[in-house]
Image (cartoon, rainbow, N blue to C red):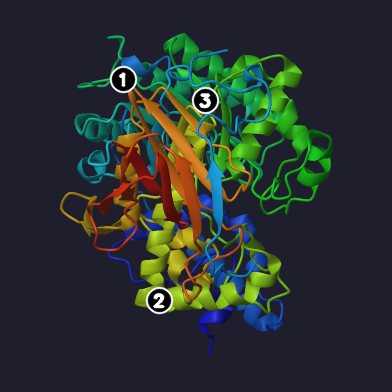
Amino acid sequence: MLKKADLAAEGKAPSFHLNFRNNDEIMMKYKIYTSVFSVAKMKYWISMKKVKFLWRIRKTFVFFLFFILISLLVTASGCNNPSSTQKKNVNGSAESHEETEQTTADISDRNNYAGSEDSVSTNTEGSIIIGVEYVFPGLADDFAETGIRAVKPFPEAIMWEKMQKSADSPVDYSVLDRFVKEYQEAGFENVFITLRSRNNWASKDYITNHSPKEQYMDLYKAWVSGIAERYDMDGIDDMPGLLRPAIYFEIGSEFSTYEPEPVDDYIEMLKVAYEAIHEAAANAIVLHVPFLTTTAFKDHPEPQDYEKTFAEVDKRIMYHSLEEIRELLDSYDFFDAVNIHLLGHPYEIEANIEWLNYEMNLRGYKKPIIISDTSVSPFVAWGPANDCEIKIPKPGIIIPPATEKDRCRLAEYFKKLIEGDEGYLNWVRAFCAADIAKMVTVAAEQKVALINTAFTEDFELAQTEIFGAAAGNASWSGMTKVKMNYKKNEHEVVQKYPSFYALKQIAGYLKEYESVERVSFEDDSIRVYEIESGKDIFYIAWYEPGYLVLPEDPVPEKLLELDVIFGKVTLEKLIAEVGRQEPEKETVSTQDGILKTVLTNVPVFIFPE
């Protein structure tokens, strides 16, 4: 008899281990998961210790299951769109510390981002646009409560082959219309539409090259042009009931196995899409396929070392080379903003922005930077996380702040999560809330134009033993728990996790501001950000110990001394506790304007009075 572990092949689970409510939900959950870690990457999990007979049975079974799942229709429709007032936002050209440490900073001494002002991409409208991914029908009203300004529909629900079944078929806008209508009516300003060209009748190769065959390039052009025209709100061929124009269009979902075609083929497709979209909608913002560089900057390389460090990144992450990325960046006439995915530590943002500004400076241009996909720090990803003994196939990739020496501790941690340990589940929910707040804050300070936070709901398949927690913490990073409403064919929120309320909290305070600056400390583990909003100044602060902290570890602490001038401050904790919907607040007195407070790895808001 086959055991569960024997069936973990190519990232797909046998149907008798799935407990979903209908085929549509199976398809949705499956595709959410594979949208983060592709089937090609999951092949690294296959256990070579199994006998060939069992291996062949398993492979045949999974191959069959894959095509059953692909045949199911994703039940999605409804997203959101940007308002005309947003068109300029991205316009154009070791051991746990048990004793308390102390450090002091002067507000006037800022840790300015490396490089001259001219080397830094600018968010021309000021405040960062905060979004969320992936949205589905039924979630609009709930996520409108967060006050965020953007949403990203599930890309696979609206890719070309889903909207146009054959060369002779008309384009079916019904799924995308439903997204746009629902999320616009809920009040969202911005939509983020990913245009995936993968097509079983038009792509050069369905697996290895998603760019259109030459004879179908005109149909591809018509597809992207039609979408831009339908949602541009110019009064010509618009979607009935359109409330705001859609301006964000991403050509391809990720420069990895999700866009495996040769870079020259991709650039040809990008040029066609760029020109077609701008012919239909002059104010559109077209983005190239986002780069994925997770772990490339973990050792903080200097520019002269970029080639070496990029070449060392595991090919499960970097399917395309730095040379190919640079070739795409050379085609700057065919994108309006630089696009990247951040699926690791929040501080990857700083190194990635520095690198992208370096690359743009070499080419003599400057464009806004968008982070179109994110993930909480997974600790382990792109392979099994719950077994520290696996050598063949390759184990999951360790992601900072974790190190290789943490692998066996992490295996026990993820086993607890898979088993449903309540204490561990509550801990990871709190961790995800803090990580999202940190990522948004760092992105705002780095002048990122837009960031999509993740995710609206959990990856339920990835939480099962058969998948080995191969997405790491991301499997439990959902902001809500949902159930299916069969009559309406949509999702219903039944529980909101701490990350939902943390997103609402951080989005509220970063909705409008003039500047976000990092306050400089000799100790770089102290993270304090000063936000200037109108006549008000407040701070977001936390302690980053620089090592892996797990539920069984002491909470890391460090004493902060900060000159806030005023005699009193209100400390507001980030909402990072299951069951809590409102933040804890405390008013404390300063000593001659110096605030003394203990920081942990959970952010706190500091409001001088």
The residue under label 1 is which amino acid type?
A: Ser
Query: Looking at the image, is 390 positioned above or below residue 462?
Result: below
Hey, which quadrant is residue 496 in on the image?
Answer: bottom left
* Depth check, front residue: 555 or 319: 555
Report the residue marked by disc 1.
Answer: 83
Q: Position of residue 541 (x, y in %)?
A: 45, 46
Is residue 464 positioned above or below 91 on the image? below
Amino acid carrying mark 3 in the image? Tyr
Q: Earlier in the sequence, mark 3 or mark 1?
A: 1
- Residue that numbered label 2 is attached to: 16
- Viewer-nearest residue: 13 or 148: 148
Q: Looking at the image, is mark 2 or mark 3 earlier in the sequence?
A: 2
Res 437 label? none
Q: Residue at x 48, y 76 (%)?
A: 552
Spatial distance from mark 3 to mark 1, Cα to Cα? 26 Å
Q: Quadrant of the C terminus?
A: top left
Tell me the SS state at disc 2. Answer: helix
Disc 1 to disc 2, C-alpha distance: 46 Å
- Residue at figure coordinates x 48%, y 27% from the top left: 449
The answer for how far apart the CA atoms under marks 2 and 3 are is 39 Å
Query: Farthest left residue?
Result: 487
Asked which secondary structure carries label 3, the reply is helix
Name the foreground residue: 515 vs 230. 515
Residue on which disc 3 sits:
220
> In this view of the protein, can residue 171 be seen by the observer?
no
**Residue 325 falls in which quadrant of the image?**
top right
Horizontal placement of 115 versus 381: left or right? right
